[in-house]
Image: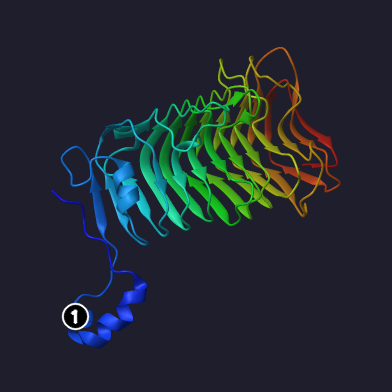
Amino acid sequence: MSAPSRRLPARLLPALCLAVPLLCVAVPAGARTLDVGPDKPLKQPSEAAAAAADGDRIVIAPGEYFDCAVWHASKLVIEGSGRPEDTVITDKTCQGKGLFLIDGEDITIRNLTLTRARVPDGNGAGIRMEASNLTIEHVRFVNNQNGILTNGDVKGTLLVRDSEFLRNGACGGACAHGIYAGNLDLLQVEGSKFFETKQAHHIKSRARRTEVIDSDLQDGPNGTSSYQIEVPNGGTVVVRGCTIQKGPQAGNHSGAIVIGMEGVTQPTREITVENNSFRVDGGYSAFLVVNETATEAMLTGNRLAGSAKALRGDGNVQ
């Protein structure tokens, strides 16, 4: 079966409507659904990426796809048709960067598993965000060098909801993390799980505002992560309602949420850490918050267990 037809270029529409006005009324432009799967018109996600136009919906059937894709169109919805674990994108990387490269703006990705991204420079990502405004929902990132990596020059928002980041991370020439957000306006992580991150951080964010809400960030018995959340250049930070654990194999014993360690270059108007549980497992102590900025960190209603401590640096503990 042939691939779906492409819409006419916008520059041709005015002339077409003058010549055949009834055609323009009868066939309004609209988003298409592109189906991907072994028995679908498009066999691989990369074929859908090549065919997609702005506003299209891409539905990927359950299966294992040894493929990668560069998504150039904007306002796409890219989703698996079943549970996240049913539709797996794995092993192959594009442009030496990752499994899915997001070059279009305002894209939503949901109900997929992205796993085993590896590239020679050690920074292979399940998703490489290269344009503004990306939403991730119900996506599993498993054993990638980075779960999500954003380009340093990308602005806008990265929203991550109800997703899992399992055994991601690496350190070598460059460190790779569960999520590594560059100079975004907002990184918001909600209802998500990070587990057994390797060597680097569960979340590293250089965004102007970083929010981690109702999420689970744990090393477990085998994880070797450095920090649970690092905000190295400052910026507004809100961490609320999370379960945070540093394990016996943790690569850094100083703290879980570490702010300003590489020098404060972002306006840091608020540091709010409230209603979290923090536990340290192992023969060492660590702080819930290490604050290297001059902005007072406000810690409220947090529950500490094991050899956990509350705060190092400026701030108040209630």
The image shows residue 13 at horizontal and vertical percentages of 31, 77
Q: Residue furthest top?
A: 283
Neighbourhood count class around disc 1 (C-alpha, 10 Å): few under 14, some 14–19, many 20 upward: few
The image shows residue 221 at horizontal and vertical percentages of 56, 15
In the image shown, does 303 or 111 lie closer to the viewer? 111
In the image shown, does 217 or 154 lie closer to the viewer? 154
The image shows residue 112 at horizontal and vertical percentages of 36, 39
Q: Please determine whether, in this image, residue 216 is positioned above or below residue 185.
A: above
The image shows residue 99 at horizontal and vertical percentages of 43, 36
In the image shown, does 200 or 98 lie closer to the viewer? 98
In the image shown, does 317 or 314 lie closer to the viewer? 314
Instruction: Look at the numbered disc 1 and give the secondary structure of its residue.
Output: helix
The reply, left or right, for residue 111 in relation to residue 241 is left
Q: Quadrant of the C terminus?
A: top right
* Numbered label tally: 1
Q: Is residue 191 visible?
A: no
Query: Toward which corner of the image does residue 107 lie, by quadrant?
Result: bottom left
The reply, left or right, for residue 254 in relation to residue 227 is right
Q: Residue furthest left?
A: 1
Coloring basis for residues:
rainbow
Q: Residue at x 83, y 48 (%)?
A: 295
Q: Please determine whether, in this image, residue 32 is positioned above or below residue 95.
A: below
Say which residue label 1 marks.
Answer: 23
Q: Please determine whether, in this image, residue 83 is positioned above or below residue 12.
A: above
Q: Residue at x 33, y 43 (%)?
A: 46
The reply, left or right, for residue 269 in relation to residue 190 is right
Query: Toward which corner of the image does residue 30 lie, by quadrant?
Result: bottom left
Q: Residue at x 38, y 37 (%)?
A: 68
Q: Is residue 30 visible?
A: yes
Mark 1: amino acid: Leu
